[in-house]
Image (cartoon, grey):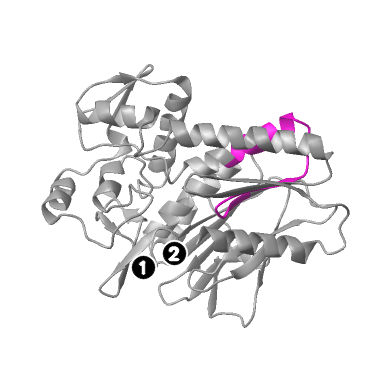
Amino acid sequence: MFARLCLIFLILIGLAGCDRPPPLVQQESYVFGTRVEILVAGAPEKQAREAAAAVLRDFDRLHRTYHAWQPSELTAVNDALAAGKSIRVSPEMLEFITEARDLARLGSYRFDPGIGRLIQLWGFHSDEFKPQLPDPEALAAWRARPASVAQLRLDGPRVSSSNPALALDFGGYLKGVALDRAAALLRAQGIRNALINIGGNVMALGDKYGKPWKVGIQHPRQPGPLATLELRDGEAIGTSGDYQRYFELQGRRYSHLLDPASGEPADHTQAVTVLMPPGPKAGTLSDALSKPIFIAGPEHWQEAARQVGVTQVLRVGPGGEIQVTQALKGRLSFLGKPPPMTEVP
């Protein structure tokens, strides 16, 4: 799947720049459980490669520090919470916890980084997961006393909780944070034109030799993009989909996008893509705010989008039907025969 996203990304680069000047400088790695690519245009090669390498080093540090199931600073926090103890956290960790908690509250906790134990019960705390359902008794126990980031207590630099089932997982948030940090690092090193791609979460800086950066929105059920989009300077796009981390059992798809209210994977949506305008937190918001819109489902996703302040949304329903907001529709170029589509305010 990650290779497919990468292929779409590279194809679109070619489509958008047949007559461009010298080739782009490209650096890539594999962090956050996905392929990461950085493209730099219009800068000397040495400067571009050094700047991109600094970004990839920061990505690797974030990945190791906040890994949710391999030994890390984050797992040490979760171990303390499970034992009913308070623990002193770093200033950066405290900043992430505070910001993630605020974003969870904004989305009525449909996005909730405190459900790490629930994610583990479903088997998604692993690089490879088996097609099996959670233990019914363990799932019932979690539902009887569900955990939420809202149950965290912050006392200066110390963190604690009265619910030992609370475990932090920044998987629905950290890629967006990384986009913002990458943009800041690149700008600080004199890079003005770049594209940062973290497994389909993308941010644009400047342009590509005078033309907008063009990216694809992955089709949730077919290889290749559903549509393309030209990103402007500072814009970020994020997608939550049921096609990246999932298993199938007895003809049903179970994805990693869990509804904290039910304790079950949301099965009413294939994908949600949001486009965020330029701003210091555009990347963070593009990653975190696609989740509550996805989880809200067909009847409430528009309300959820308004609640979190997102105006540019594309939603793919369970049968492949598309709903797109007026603010985003004019920016999209659909490939092939246009799918069934409803435009909404």
Mark 2 packing: few (<14 Cα in 10 Å), some, or many (20+)? some
Q: Is residue 191 visible?
A: no
Mark 2 is on which residue type? Tyr
Amino acid under disc 1: His
Q: Position of residue 51 (x, y in %)?
A: 71, 34
On the rendered structure, is 120 left or right of 8? left
What are the residue bounds of the magenta stretch?
179-202
Locate residue 54: give its quadrant: top right
Which residue in the protein does label 1 denote? 268
Query: Is 56 drawn above or below residue 229 in the view shown?
Result: above
- The quarter of the rendered structure image containing the C terminus is bottom right
Whether residue 272 is situated above or below residue 164 in the rendered picture: below
Which one is in front, 101 or 167? Answer: 167
Residue on which the image places disc 2: 243
- Quick one: SS at disc 2? loop
What's the mark number on residue 253?
none
Q: Which residue is painted at 48% across and 76% down in the image?
A: 321
Task: Give the camera-side residue of 235 and 7.
Answer: 7
> Where's residue 8, x and y in %?
63, 64
Point out the tag, 2 or 1, that comes first from the N-terminus.
2
Question: Any magenta on residue 198?
Answer: yes
Residue reaching furthest bottom?
A: 337
Front position in the image: 7 or 111: 7
| Vertical position of residue 127 compared to residue 89: above or below | below
In percent of width and height, residue 182 lies at 63, 37
Image coordinates of residue 69 in percent, x first then y, are 34, 39
Q: Residue furthest left?
A: 137
**Who's the residue at 33% across and 32% down the image?**
75
